[in-house]
Image (cartoon, rainbow, N blue to C red):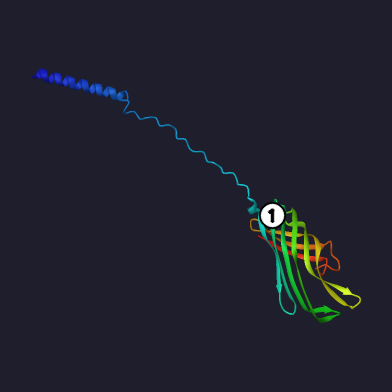
Amino acid sequence: MKNLLLVIFVAFSLSLSAQSERFKKGGSTADKPTEQSEEVKPKTQVNPEKPKSWTDKLIFGGGAGLSFGTNTNIFLAPQVGYQVNENLVVGAGYMYNYARWRSIWANGSYQNTDFENTVHGPNIFANYSPLESVFLGAQFEVLNHDAYLYNINTFDFDVENRWTNVLFVQGGFRQKVGKKGMMLLGIRYNLLHDQYSPYGASWAPIFLVYF
């Protein structure tokens, strides 16, 4: 019986020794941690700025005026511009001006009168900014209006409806409005001004706003 217990004890000791030796060597391959592959991070893609479409380069605006009373004046001048670049804008528009005067200043006092005229027609323009706050340009108009021609036989004025060309050179100050809009404040001069011009003077102020 003692011999049998001795054999069992020896066998158990050898088993423990074998197990200890296996763990010292790191155990089985199944127990070894697998080496993880290095995680590849996706590259951040930088989206290049998309070029502006032609519609993004359009600006809308122009000028307008309205007055009622003894004298009535309705002025509308819508325009559409295209920004060729940061400095150059070209475009087209249409001008409508209705005016009626019942009293004018003449010979040192107000004189009663009854004058009525409608001026309208298309225009094209170009404005260039050599500096951020300055603009120079030109505007060509073809205007329909009533021209008052003095008749030496009747000693009175005859009314003649006609089309007249107008060529303005212009310049002044420019102020940016929003991302692409602007406000123009300046003066213009009509190179084709004569006695039949639809404008009362060769010089005219400019106040235009675009968005």
From this view, report whether residue 128 is shown above or below residue 145: above
Mark 1 — residue?
A: 82
Residue 87, position as x, y percentages in the image = 72, 52
Horizontal relation, residue 75 to residue 27: left or right: right
Image quadrant containing the N terminus: top left
Residue 5, position as x, y percentages in the image = 12, 21
Q: Residue furthest right?
A: 153
Q: Residue furthest left?
A: 1
From this view, report whether residue 205 is shown above or below residue 32: below
Residue sitting at x 74%, y 69%: 97
Image quadrant containing the C terminus: bottom right
Horizontal relation, residue 60 to residue 109: left or right: left
Residue sitting at x 78%, y 69%: 145
Q: 16 or 191, which lies in front?
A: 191
Q: 21 or 113, which lies in front?
A: 113
Q: What is the secondary structure assignment of the residue under circle 1?
A: strand
Residue 26, position as x, y percentages in the image = 32, 25
Q: 151 or 29, which lies in front?
A: 151
